[in-house]
Amino acid sequence: MKTKATVKTYGVITLFVAFLFGAAIAKLSYVVLSEEVDGVNLQEKSASITTATKTLYASRGSIFDSNGEKLASTVNSYKLIAYLSSTRTTNDKNPRHVVDKEKTAQELAPILEMDVETLLGYLNKDAYQVEFGAKGKGLTERVKKQIEALELPGIDFVTSTKRYYDMASFASYIVGYAKVSEEGEITGELGVEGYYNDILAGTNGQTTYQKYTSSNYQIPNTPSTTKKAKNGSDVYLTIDSSIQLIAEKAVSKYPEYDVEWALMAVMDAETGAIVASATYPNFDPNNTNTIKSYMNPLVSYQYEPGSVMKIFSWASAIEEKQYDGSETYSSGSIEVADAVIRDANRTGWGTISFDTGFAYSSNVAATLLSKRLGASSLQNYYERLGFGSETGIELSNEVTGRVEIMRPTELANASFGQGISVTPVQMLQALSSMTNKGEVVKPYIVDKVVDADGKVTYKGERTVVDRVYKPETVLKMHELMHNVVYEGLTTMWQVPNVNVMGKTGTAQIASPQGGYLKGEYNNIKSFAGIFPADKPKYIIYTVAKQVHAAAKYFSMPVTTAIEEIASYAKLTENQENIIENKTVTIDNYISKETEGSVALLNEAKLKPIVIGKGKYVIDQYPLKGTNVLNGSKVFLLTNNEERIMPSIIGWSRSEVESLCTLSKVTCQFDGYGFVRESSVEEGSDILSDTVVSVLLE
């Protein structure tokens, strides 16, 4: 009986084991043959575990000026970190963590421009390592070397890339800027960086390979596929750095007259190439915190242009044979519908000719001519010149302005540039009709695009938009515009050794409440100039809002710029008086002896301003590579805390700001213009808590 029972038990066990084995086989078959088990796609899961994809980043292209000078490039960037844990140090003679936190904070503070207390807040954290916030990121090679020279234990750097702008705020609204994401991707914003972002960025590649499940290393002898990155193209601008520098210097004068904004743009009169576009305020694309406006004045500001528009209302009347320059009229005022149109000289100049009316910028003459033309005809001419439409220049956020002429008062106002709105780039395009025998030429800012293989994939060129005026109409306008400068009401627009023709404009500013703002300085001043008059090479257009100064202070930077541009381009009529090229490229003086640096600057016809009595230079402004004009001040900060106040009487506001920034003192300004008085006398000590109060005049 026992034997039979045993056999029966073994049989049951065998059957049970066979059942389990069959169930396992069935389950395994199900898993192998099924795409999804318990809501998990096993094939996708397996692939994700064993397949890795690595991005191969493309190198972003650079931006150059017309002469091949680099304006924007991709460089190494550094993030400062500090190791706090003592476990890093295995040899007390070679510490690898921050040992003296107080000393570390004190020595880093001036370089990072941070308070010692703030730095100690980071260094006193209970952490293995720390970073130092925004001011500890995006450090340049120069700053890295300054910190490394301190030889502080536990201080290290994390290397990445960033966009670097070699000439800082130079042509900043044209070049634009680029941001770096947390993943290291660089994206252009504003200016050419934004407009040509895809072309500059190139195309990233990738490598796909089999990896160990526990790491990202490729499994040996397994296949991989690679799509190579396509590096970005280089963009060459039409900007001529020498002319841009002259324009930047000119525009830098306007803050002294408390302007809200100002722009000076220079265009090749024949081709439409923009060779300079300087703005106030501008910004340093290396520090986006300096951006006050994300609109480029050249293409994004629209405003009522004032009497510069008389160039085109007069030309249109001439073209339509509605003009006799010797015909006379009574100046002063004229009634139009329910309004009275007045000349700037409200009593007028008596009975004068229409030719004289242009030289005197008579609103009454413009009104009479516009009535002969009619609203539809004048609007048609304005639109053919490009007003009311985008020019299509290679810059983002271009606006169209507004040209709508319907009622009699709108017709009269439009003839002298009120009641309509334009942009500076539209004005340059329209002015090209005066230098191309009536043809309107499209402005452009990009000379060429060169891909990573050196192939030119795009070439900027002269493009005719329309032929609006006959050559004989343009010749008559040359005569009238020349008379504005040499036979008009003022001589302030005349330039030594340069034959200039042009037209001024003063427009009222529209009030948000309706009508126009009141007040002596609530206007927009502008000047459209062409030189040389006998054979036009350049068109210059300058416009500024709310110039708190007499008219001559608006004209002086413009005429100086014209003289310097003509000298640089060898266009002056008296060849004996041609001045040598005034531009000088700043060298690097940091870590060099102060005495030798001063000698080199004097030799280069620059004015060194030494801050401190140290033997060595530890900082400078402007930085290496910046182009400046002969006679410009170069500030040298030395390695000595004993700093003496130089004489700043007659300095510009920007020069005083440079002094205060490097000296790390506060400066306060009252008024506009140049320094008349200073609260800190020449020869006084400049301490860290010094406040320099300056009266400008």
Image: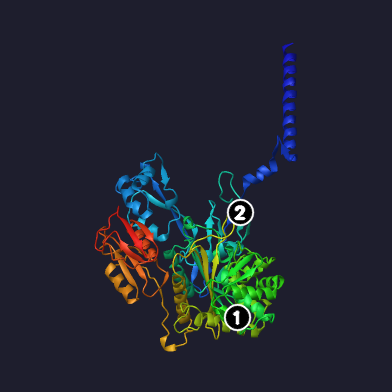
Residue 674 pos. (x, y %)? 37, 66
Residue named by callout 2: 221
Placement of the C terminus among the 4 image quadrants: bottom left
Please state which of the two labelled residues, at mark 2 or mark 1, is closer to the viewer: 1
Placement of the N terminus among the 4 image quadrants: top right
**SS at circle 1:** helix
Res 267 quadrant in image: bottom right
Numbered mark located on residue 354 in the image: 1
Q: Residue at x 65, y 66 (%)?
A: 409
**SS at circle 2:** loop
The residue lying toward the viewer, choosing from 135 and 338, is 338
Residue 325 pos. (x, y %)? 61, 83
Inspect the image, locate mark 2, and give the three-letter code of the amino acid beneath it: Asn
**How is this picture coloured?**
rainbow
User: Taking 256 as reference, is 428 above or below it?
Assistant: below
Residue 487: tell me if it is visible: yes
Instruction: First in sequence, mark 2 or 1: give its number.
Output: 2
Residue 651 pos. (x, y %)? 35, 67
Within-10-Å neighbours for mark 1: few <14, some 14–19, many 20+: many
User: Taking 328 as reference, is 443 above or below it?
Assistant: above
User: Taking 130 as reference, is 239 above or below it?
Assistant: below
Q: CA distance from mark 2 to mark 1?
A: 89 Å
Residue 564 pos. (x, y %)? 45, 78
Within-10-Å neighbours for mark 2: few <14, some 14–19, many 20+: few
The residue lying toward the viewer, choosing from 148 and 625, is 625
Residue 668 falls left or right of residue 334: left
The residue lying toward the viewer, choosing from 220 and 190, is 190
Residue 89: tell me if it is visible: no
